[in-house]
Image (cartoon, rainbow, N blue to C red):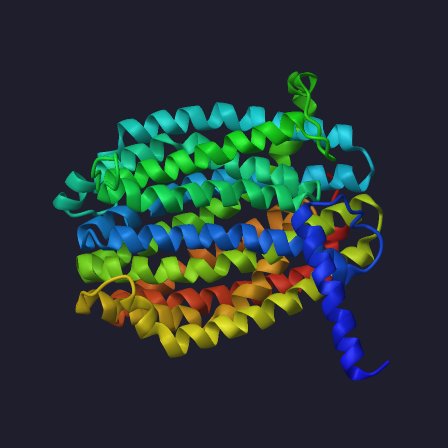
Amino acid sequence: MSLSNQHTSRLTLFISLLKQSLRGDEHDYTQGSIRQAIVLLAIPMILELGLESIFAVVDMFFVGKLGSTAIQSVGLTESVIAIIYTLGMGLGMGTTAVVARRIGEKNPDAAAHAGAQAILISLFITIVISITGFVYAPDILRLMKAAPEVVQEGAVFARIMLGGSLVIILLFLINGIFRGAGDAALAMRSLWLASGINIILCPTLINGYGPFPELGLKGAAIATTVGRGIGVLYQCYHLFSRKGVIKIKMVHFNWDWPLIRSIVKVSWPAVLQFFIASGSWIILTRLVAEMGGKDASSGYQIAIRNAVFFILPAWGLSNAAATLVGQNLGAKQPERASQSVLLTAKYNAVFMSAVMLLFVVFASPIISIFTKENAVQNIGRVALQIIGTGYIFYGIGMVMIQALNGAGDTRTPTWIHFVGFWLFQIPLAYFMAKVLDWGPTGVFVAIPVAETAMAITAWIFFKKGKWKKVVV
């Protein structure tokens, strides 16, 4: 076969896989080509989280027009909501591991039962969190060292966002069920719907287009919460009425304490794992605000939003590794699981290398899109360039961590995060920011240094192979 014919054949195959992945066709990920399995899972997961990252950047774009006070209000609130994300992501990760293992064992009814029990767990947790966040929103902003004007203007934004914690957690959790079942396309479509509605409502409610009043920062919060709520309704519709791998029935919601304990056993280290990372982010955000004031905090928030824009698609590729590990371990194929992870890590490293070059070279024009204030631009540019230098290691580390999580070995990544973030990154940030007097720049430098160390550590633990023997 000639070289041109080979390229044509590969392109045809890729287009065929692309269509199959977007349709959400059922596929046995424990058999056949590993490359094709990665593509089928990764494309919808990347597109899913890619639009979520667009949603975050669009929010910051429109909020940025309201000034640095609004930017800091959103940034500080989001840093606290990151704790809510940790619950959703942790429960979702634990549920993905259990559901994927049952699917790999060819037991879809048990997978549906596990998903229903995970939803019950999340409902009890988030009702308490939503009420607490709504009532104490201003106090939470003060705790984050927000300026008085930020507390005054941002309290309503924080109340709505924290009060809507239920839809945040359910959106993550139910998508975790779909991913564990290998139905990444449905997870993608639910997040697309939520993000799409937010992208439309955000400028409409902030600026008051058409029949809608001008709500400013309050409008941004309403748009986000409504979009996520509709996304959850879409998930529930398909979860209870669709003809797919996962078919949840009311009988699956009967309390099953042994299963609940099993899900909690896998999920709590994952929740703690993400909590550790989010807690570190909160502390660094507070440190930047303390050392550099409102302008530094605003510039840092813009840089972080752009960093997340490219990290989330890479996280989507990492989620594919988690599903492949879980299902292949369930099918008693640990070596196939290992091969899937290594190939996924290779793809993620290539993608993140391109992102690193983009941030290092084009930081200034990227930041200037979101703000015209020179002081904020300067901080944002420096932050984006420094944080961007570690992107290759971010990509590899993500895959290794998610592979361990997908195997149900959520404890090892938790220890890696605890040591890496709390015993290394935070002390290093304080040392460089205060002792060396680098200010906010010291915080920025600590991020890629710590992430690189954690990626290397995760690689070492993955290669040891103890995750292959974890029982879920």
Q: Quadrant of residue 238?
A: top right
- Left or right, 69 with respect to 48, comes to left
Q: Can see residue 140?
A: no
Q: Is residue 375 above or below residue 410?
A: below
Name the residue rendered at 60%, 52% in the picture: 45
Q: Is residue 50 above or below residue 431?
A: above
Residue 338 pos. (x, y %) = 75, 59
Image quarter of the C terminus: top right
Image quarter of the N terminus: bottom right
Name the residue rendered at 45%, 57% in the picture: 421
Decide which of 447, 231 is in the foreground and name it: 231
Q: Count of labels shown?
A: 0
Name the residue rendered at 31%, 60% in the picture: 302
- Left or right, 213 with respect to 404, comes to left
Residue 279 pos. (x, y %) = 40, 48
Residue 112 pos. (x, y %) = 70, 29
Q: Is residue 329 above or below residue 32?
A: above
Decide which of 163, 435 is in the foreground and name it: 163
Decide which of 297, 199 is in the foreground and name it: 199
Residue 267 pos. (x, y %) = 59, 38
Name the residue rendered at 28%, 33% in the picture: 159
Q: Quadrant of residue 8?
A: bottom right
Q: Can see residue 294?
A: yes
Q: Residue furthest bottom?
A: 2
